[in-house]
Image (cartoon, grey):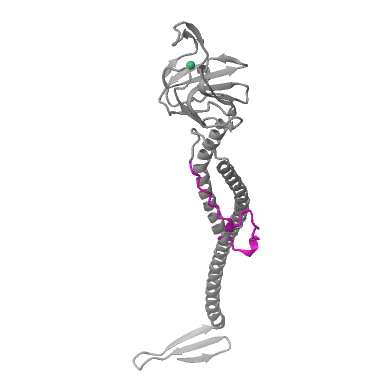
Amino acid sequence: MRVGRSSQGMTLLILRDGQVPVRQLYLSKPVMVCVPMAALLSISSLIISLHLRSADRIAGLEHQLLQQQLTMEAVVSDKNEALRRLQSQVVSLSKESKSFKARLGTVSALQEQLEHFLEKNKLSVSAGNSTKLSSLSWDRSRKVGGEFIAVHDVSTDALARETEDDFSAMNTLLDEMQKQIPAQISTAQAHIEALSGTPSLWPTPSRRITSSFGYRRDPFTGRAAFHAGIDIGGQVGDPVYAAAAGKVTAVQQDGSRGKYIIIRHPNGLETWYMHLNSAEVRKDEDILKGQLIGQLGNTGRSTGPHLHFQVMKKDEAVDPLPYMN
Ligand SMILES: [Zn+2]
């Protein structure tokens, strides 16, 4: 191809191989300017449009990324807040467990004192129970009521573990207390009962009443006579117990009552025990309810082994049966 210039335009000669004639293409000046301009414009607009599309896309992606980042930040912030709350709960729980442990230690010590008191004042009463109470095993090395370790010194994990251990130790102690306290209560009740001054305890194992309180036919004379107590038939040597706590005011023997014991009780009542085989107490001795005081016998004015049991109220004989349990 050859290019020829004129002042108005441009002539293009298109030469191919020998068989094809030469073609002449005339391009006027405006065409010469407009065609490249149009080409340049369309390329530029293509580039601009591509650029705009990618900028749009990038902005979209950036927006999406920002949204995700914000969401993540909110989640992390929530988690941090929850963690802070949990940590504060662990700390407060740990403080509470320390205080609770200290109080439990005090209660445990009180229970131990009660146990020692009951042991020391163990009463030799037939009705008393002799349950051996095992000692509480509160480990004092665990620093009951001890110093509180500052939270910043230990991790929340360690604090939580320690608190868990504390609660487990407290549970064990409470289990033991739950097992022992009922036994201690019955021991204490037995002690209180033993100190009771009201004659309510049946004085000998036999329950056979051979003669009741009131007027009866005298077994010796056959005439009507007042019987001031009850006769309980039994075997010589059967134990005779004090019907209530009190002080022995008489241990004597005579032809009518045989060997007899009189006990004065704190509420003013007296109980008399007659026809005994032997006496196991001395005058002025303080005795407990249910304590062995003598042996059933057949001494004095008696037709067979029995205990004559009498209750005196203001120096007057009263029916013992309403007092008996
Ligand atoms: Zn009698």
**Residue range of the region highlighted in magenta in the rendering:** 131-157
Report x, y in % for residue 19: 34, 92
Residue 74 in which image quadrant: bottom right
Q: Is residue 238 above or below residue 220?
A: below
Of 94 and 265, the residue lying toward us:
265
Report x, y in % for residue 6: 56, 89
Q: Determine if residue 325 is in view.
A: no
Of 240 and 33, the residue lying toward us:
240
Report x, y in % for residue 70: 59, 61
Query: Does the magenta portion include 190?
Result: no
> What is the residue that sits farthest to the top in this orientation?
223
Of 252 and 227, the residue lying toward us:
252
Relative placement, left or right, of 84 versus 15 is right
Report x, y in % for residue 188: 55, 36
> What is the residue that sits farthest to the bottom in this orientation?
18
> What is the residue that sits farthest to the front in this orientation?
255
Residue 162 in which image quadrant: bottom right
Of 312 and 161, the residue lying toward us:
312
